Amino acid sequence: MADKLEIVYSRLLEIKLSAEQKGRFQTGLIKYWNGNDQAGIKSSLDNLKYYDSPDQLNELRTSSQATIVEGLRRDAADTGDPVSGVLVEAFDIAHPGRGAETRVRTFPDLVGTWKRQDALGARVDPNSGSAVGVSYTDSGALEITQKGAFTMVKVHNHCSGTCCRMDGSEEKGTVSLVAGKMVLQTVSGSKLTEDPCVGAKQRTAIKAHRESVAWSIRPNPNNNATTLCLNTGPDTAECYEKQ
């Protein structure tokens, strides 16, 4: 397994481990299992899957290499993880000019206004000119201040034909970074639902709560805009562009 993982990381990060680095890499993997390090074990097994999927590995390298290296830097700095440490060491040797690009992002990098928007247009009936079928717009905005306050607004409009339902929310609170994750402490907020077709309109309060999410800042592959991505699941994320 260690040899296959080494091949995966070598291709993903475009590095070549020396004999001494290979020894430290393998020792670090053994420590994951001997120490029952669930995060290290899961990460290793997840990445091992790319050994038999070279096309997916190439796609991951193209889209996320810098973000992955930043995550390895954070792990090495926060936990002293030996596997992350040796991979970062090898990356810096192989790519001496990419230190700034792959640096660990800190709170000042989050300050500002971030927005996202997605949409699906309805089909237009050529005879009547009216909208037919399903359409939607989905948008969000996240504002983070230097003092550690945040405001998050989300609006989703879902239409079927000419009937549309709007679901929106606004949350306010404090934001901080803890062990590399973004911690959003919501102090106040509300949700609003409107559906004129059924005469529904309801506003409810959002209870105070705490949410800890993995995050990354990366360039948008389509337009190179600075983009903040918040993980919403194991393989899903909401991504906001810096304004």
Image (cartoon, grey):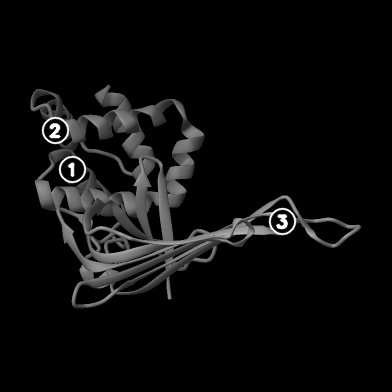
> Tag 3: residue type?
Ala
**Residue for point 81% across, 61% down:** 130
Residue 26 picture quarter: top left
What is the x, y in percent for residue 234? 36, 40
- The reply to whether residue 137 is in sight is no
Q: Point out the frontmost of discs 1 and 3.
A: 3
Image quadrant assignment for residue 20: top left
Image quarter of the N terminus: top left
Q: Which comes sooner in the sequence, label 1 or label 3?
A: 1
Horizontal and vertical percent for residue 16? 29, 40
118 on left or right of 210: right
Mark pair 2, 3: CA separation = 53 Å
Which residue was labeled with disc 2?
Answer: 28
The label on residue 122 is: 3
Label 1, label 2: how far apart the Cα atoms are: 9 Å
SS under mark 3? loop
Residue lying farthest to the right in this orientation: 127
**Residue located beneath label 1 in the image:** 86
Residue type pointed to by label 2: Gly
Q: Residue 233 at x, y = what percent?
A: 36, 43
